[in-house]
Image (cartoon, rainbow, N blue to C red):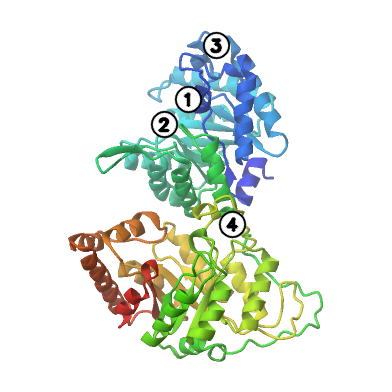
Amino acid sequence: MDNKLSKALKERVLIFDGAMGTELYKRNFFINTSFENLSLTSPGIVREIHESYRKAGAEVLTTNTYCANFPQLNKFLLGDKVKEINAASVRIAREVAGEDLLVAGSVGPVGEFLAGDAKGDLSRIVEYLSRQISAQREEGVDFLIFESLRHPGDLEALLMTMKEFPSLPFVTSFALDPADPVSSAKKAVEMIARAAGAEHAPDAAGLNCGMGPEGMLGALETILPQSPLPLIAQPNAGMPKRVDNRMIYMCSPEYFTTYAVRMLQLGARGLGGCCGTGPGHIEDMARSVKPLARASSGSSHVFSVSREDPAVPVLEEAPLSERSAFGAKLAAGKWITNIEITPPMGYSLEKTLKSARACAEAGFDAVNIPDGPRASSRISAMVAAYRIKQEAKIDVVLHVCCRDRNLIGLQSELLGCAALGIHNLLFITGDPPKLGNYPFASGVFDLDSIGMLKVQKNLNRGLDIGGKSIGEKTFAVSGAGADPNAIDMKREIRRTQEKIDAGAEFITTQPVFDIEPLLRFIDAVPGLSGIPVIAGIWPLASYRNAEFMRNEVPGVVVPDSVMERMARADTKEAQKEEGIAIAREAVEAIRNKVGGVQVSAPFGNVNTAIAVVK
C-alpha cells in the first residue's frame, strides 16, 4: 500500500518549500546561533516561515531540523536537547501543514563521518541518527528527507539506521560538487542505485544544494534516465555568471522558475528550493509548475467517450481530402508552405490582413495563427482566422491552446470553428501564464493537446465530450506540435506517437536550424512515416535575435555554426540577409525529407518569410 509520499509523487509533481536557514538569517539571526534551537526559543518566527511557504503554494513543509543531531547541536552546548528540539520543530510544521500538506523531517549530515570504513564511526552515526529520527517519528512526520548527502559512508549509515524504522518513508537527497559536476553526477547515480536496492529503500531520491538551477538541470539530464527512483530537484537560488565582464547573480524568482519548468519537462517528480530561495521563489515556481504539471501528467490527457445511449449514431469521418483545401494537399502528398502570423495585441486587423494578402499572392498554402503565444493576451485567434480566410482569400491553420479554457469552453470553440468554416486546427498544450504578460492569470489545462485531439476526433464522428450526438459531424483537419530538440527525447518521442494515435494528421515542429536532430527525430517516431511533417523555419533577423532564440526560447537549438555566420555579418541588413540565406539552405536540405515548411515572420515582417520561399 502506498504511503502519503509515494502516492503524491505518482499523482502529481509535488511542490516542496525553500530554504529555512536563509529566511531565519533574513530575520537577524546570525550564524553564531543554532537555527534549530529557534524552534524552542523563537517558535513564532519558525511558524511564520512555514506559513509563508504554505501561502506561496508549497505542498511539503520541511522541518527546522537540518542540524538537529547531537554533534551539530553540541557545538552550541545543546547536545542534551536533541529530542526536545526535533519534537518542537515537527510540531510547529505539523500545526501549519494541517491535514492538507505533507511534513518532511529534515535530517542533515552528522558531520563526523569521513572515511566510510570505520565501524566505530558508523555505529556512532547510526546512534545519532536514530535519536533524531525517533523524536521526529513520535511527533508525526509524514516522511524523512536526508539532505546534502555527499559520501557513500553517509548513505550506508542512514540505510543502516532506517532498518530500525521499516514503516517510515524517506528520501535520500544528494549534493553535487559544482567544481566537478560530471564525476559527482556519476557518483550520485551509483548511490541512488545502492539506495534503491536496500532492504528498506527510499521512496524517492533527490538533488539539493551545491548547484544553482542551471547546473542542476544539466545534472538531471544525466541522472534522471538512470534513476530507478522518482527524482526531486531542489537547487540553490542561483550562482554568479559572467555577462559582459560583469558577475551577475542569476537568482530572481523568474530565473528560478524558468529552470524549474525545464526540470518538470525533463521528468522531475518534485520541485523545491535550497539555499538562497525563499517564499517568492516558491510562489513564482508553483504558479507556473502546477498548471503545467497537470497538463504534462499521464492522466491529464485521458479522454474517452462515455456512451450513455448505445443507440447514439457514430458517423463516419469524412476523408481528409474532402475536409479543406489544406487537407486535400496533405492527402495528395503535395509540398506545403505555411507562414505563421501572430494576431495583434489590439483589435485592428488591417495590418494583419494586408500581410495575409501578400502571403496569398506569394503562393503560401495557409496562414498559421497562434493562440496566445508565450501566454500573451491578443485578439481572438479564431476571429483573426475567420477574417483572414474571408478577406485575404487564403486557407488558415488555427492553433487551439488548452491553457485558457476548460473542457466545455474548448468544445464550444471547436464547434464555433466548424460553424465558421475554419477546419484546419493545430492543437497545443500552451505555455504557462507565468511566461506571459499577465503572470497572475490562471492556467486551466483541463486537457493537453493529446486529449484535445481525441475530443476533435469524436466531433468529426458526430459525438460530443459526453458521448451525445451533435446531430452532424465536423470536418476538422487535426495537427499537433513536436520538438525535435527536446531535453527529454524519450518523452517527446512517446508523446508525439500518442498524438498521432489520438488523431493527429500532420505534425508541425518547433523552428529547426540543425537538420540532423530533425531527421533523427522523424526516424525515431514510428507514426511519422505515415503523416506529413511540416518543419518550422525561423529566418533570423539579426545576431541579437539569434541569441534570444538560442537562450530564451524552449525547444529551439541554434548551432554554433549558425551563431558564427550571424556574427560575421557586420551590419543589420547583412545579418538579415544571412538569416534568410540560412533559412533557405535549411528548406533545401529537408525538401525531400518532410512534407513542407512553416516559415515564421520575425517581428511580423512577412517580406522576410516570403524571401525564404521565393
Q: Which amino acid does label 2 sit on?
A: Arg
Quadrant in the picture for residue 240: top left
According to the picture, the residue beneath numbered tag 1 turns out to be 109
Q: Which amino acid does label 1 sit on?
A: Pro
Foreground disc of the pair 2, 4: 4
Residue 150 badge: 2
Residue 3 left/right relative to 310:
left
- Give the vertical position of 436 relative to 409 (above or below): above
Q: What element carries label 2?
A: loop
User: Tag 2 or tag 1, which sits nearer the N-term?
Assistant: 1
Q: Residues within 10 Å of mark 4 (few under 14, many from 20)?
A: some
Foreground disc of the pair 4, 1: 4
Residue 491 visible to an observer of this rendering: yes
- Give the vertical position of 134 relative to 194 (above or below): above
Q: Residues within 10 Å of mark 1 (few under 14, many from 20)?
A: many
Q: What separation in Å lies between label 3 and label 4 (alpha carbons)?
A: 45 Å
Q: Residue 88 at x, y = what percent?
A: 65, 20
User: Tag 1 or tag 4, which sits nearer the N-term?
Assistant: 1
Q: What separation in Å lies between label 1 and label 2 (alpha carbons)?
A: 9 Å
Q: Residue 81 at x, y = what percent?
A: 60, 12
Q: Which amino acid does label 4 sit on?
A: Ser
